[in-house]
């Protein structure tokens, strides 16, 4: 790491900073007017050593309610065996179909991710979040943009703040883009000292992209549209990589690291660090933990894929809790289509579904569509500018599009129907 993490610009350089000292300060806006957007002045609040969490971090009771002790039963899919075809693919497709039709989450092994690269990516995140706030702020997220560094999303929201820091950046395959976009991002916003860290994440993203495409082959088989249908759709996609850092929290039962939501993207590959759990999925009214399995990636369906499967595969409703004594890190790779690609279920999927219901001959040649056509650019804009991603993003987005979407003033008010606590503009 280019800067000495033990030297803090946060005024606490008189003690040695360890892992547990990372990022216990968040930015709080000076006045409500600062929330309107733009590069506002911000005050710094030190969370370290506070006996209680500041009010904006307190989540409404319903969201913070108890977690179940019962681990979620998730299939472990060997994607390496699936790629070899035959029984491996058949079994994988069955496992994926069952998980995605119920809660939308499964785990993957046989993915070929180099453990040394996984370790470098996790350690790189630990090192980054240990840096002085002023250094991290060089990558500060610009208003309306998903990429960059944020502390508790304080620049976007005023209530139900998540107890976390994040660093997000876009990825486009080196193969299709011809450039190393992640390396370029790190060097341009953080400086050339960060080129090696950028290279780690460039490699990590390339690996995650390949695993995602392999999973798309399995998903295609599981939905009866063949191996290449969804793989080809995402081949030239752009994705988002997010490093999540959850500091220890004095009142973990009153706040959340990441609130209840469905990922707006298509597919998420999550790497959890160590044995500390935090990710939970809502099943039959209970928040069930997904315990980290050594070497496995957690995979979940997002809203964009739910639309691409015409609602057959469920976007996974999940959240992340925090801990009193221990910090937690996770790396999320969000697979997204190319911004301008139209998201609509493949005709073969709609026809097969209609045939299964005996409607292919006359009357209704295709299964009715559950969601309108959209582009990832529009959904991304909706979640960054008009709506805080939650459990109902896709339906709210469909209503917003119905009211005119990005081109219509009325559409903005349509996006404001939701719960005030969850709806803030940037
Ligand atoms: C497109 C996106 C929006 C969020 C990041 C992501 O890339 C995918 C997941 C979304 C998010 C994590 C869902 C929970 C709420 C959120 C605000 C967060 O707590 O980080 C979401 C992200 C966002 O930055 O809007
Ligand atoms: O940290 C986790 O386990 C989950 C994070 C998450 O859901 C997200 O970043 O979208
Ligand atoms: Fe998520």
Image (cartoon, rainbow, N blue to C red):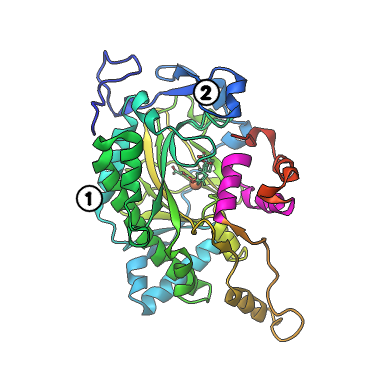
Q: Do the residues labelled 1 and 2 touch (CB within 8 Å)?
A: no
Residue at far bottom of view: 361
Instruction: Return the x and y of residue 267 as percentages of the image width and height.
Output: 48, 57
Image quadrant where residue 306 sits: bottom right
Residue extent of the magenta highlight: 376-403
Horizontal side of residue 128 vs 253, given as left or right = left
Horizontal side of residue 396 vs 269, given as left or right = right
Q: Look at 26% across and 15% down and name the residue there.
A: 15
Residue picked out by circle 1: 116
Q: Determine if residue 124 is in view.
A: yes
Quarter in which the C terminus is drawn = top right
- Please count the marks in the image: 2
Q: Is mark 1 on a helix, strand or loop?
A: helix
Horizontal side of residue 370 vs 96, given as left or right = right
Q: Look at 67% across and 61% down and name the residue there.
A: 372
Horizontal side of residue 86 vs 337, given as left or right = left
Q: Look at 40% across and 19% down and name the residue there.
A: 48
Quarter in which the N terminus is drawn = top left
* Dominant secondary-structure state across the stretch colored magenta: helix
């Amino acid at each position: 790491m280019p800067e000495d993490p033990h030297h803090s610009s946060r005024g606490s350089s008189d003690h040695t900073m360890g892992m547990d000292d990372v990022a216990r300060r968040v930015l709080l806006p000076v006045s409500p007017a600062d929330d309107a957007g733009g590069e506002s002045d911000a005050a710094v609040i030190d969370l370290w050593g506070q006996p209680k969490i500041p009010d904006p971090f307190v989540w409404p009771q319903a969201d913070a309610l108890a977690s179940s002790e019962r681990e979620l039963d998730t299939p472990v899919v060997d994607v390496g065996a699936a790629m070899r075809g035959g029984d491996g693919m058949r079994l994988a497709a069955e496992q994926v179909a069952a998980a995605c039709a119920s809660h939308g989450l499964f785990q993957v092994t046989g993915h070929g991710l180099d453990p040394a690269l996984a370790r470098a990516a996790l350690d790189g995140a630990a090192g980054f979040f240990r840096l002085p706030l002023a250094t991290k702020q060089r990558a500060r997220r610009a208003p309306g943009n998903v990429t960059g560094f944020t502390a508790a999303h304080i620049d976007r929201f005023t209530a139900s703040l998540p107890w976390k820091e994040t660093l997000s950046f876009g990825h486009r395959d080196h193969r299709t883009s011809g450039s190393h976009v992640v390396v370029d991002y790190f060097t341009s916003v953080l400086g050339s000292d960060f080129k090696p860290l950028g290279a780690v994440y460039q490699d990590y993203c390339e690996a995650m992209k390949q695993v995602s495409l392999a999973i798309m082959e399995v998903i295609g088989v599981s939905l009866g549209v063949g191996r290449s249908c969804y793989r080809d759709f995402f081949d030239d996609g752009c994705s988002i990589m997010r490093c999540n850092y959850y500091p220890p929290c004095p009142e973990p039962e009153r706040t959340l690291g990441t609130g209840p939501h469905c990922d707006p993207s298509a597919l998420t590959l999550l790497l959890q660090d160590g044995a500390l759990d935090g990710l939970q999925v809502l099943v039959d009214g209970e928040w069930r933990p997904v315990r980290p399995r050594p070497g496995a990636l957690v995979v979940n369906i997002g809203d964009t894929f739910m639309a691409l499967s015409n609602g057959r595969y469920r976007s996974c409703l999940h959240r992340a809790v925090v801990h009193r004594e221990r910090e937690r890190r996770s790396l999320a790779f969000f697979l997204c289509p190319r911004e301008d690609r139209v998201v609509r279920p493949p005709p073969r999927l709609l026809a097969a579904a209609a045939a299964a219901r005996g409607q292919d001959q006359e009357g209704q040649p295709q299964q009715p569509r559950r969601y309108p056509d959209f582009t990832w650019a529009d959904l991304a804009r909706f979640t960054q500018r008009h709506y805080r991603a939650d459990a109902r993003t896709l339906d709210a987005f469909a209503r917003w599009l119905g009211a005119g979407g990005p081109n219509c003033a009325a559409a903005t008010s349509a996006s404001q129907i939701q719960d005030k606590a969850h709806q803030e503009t940037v």
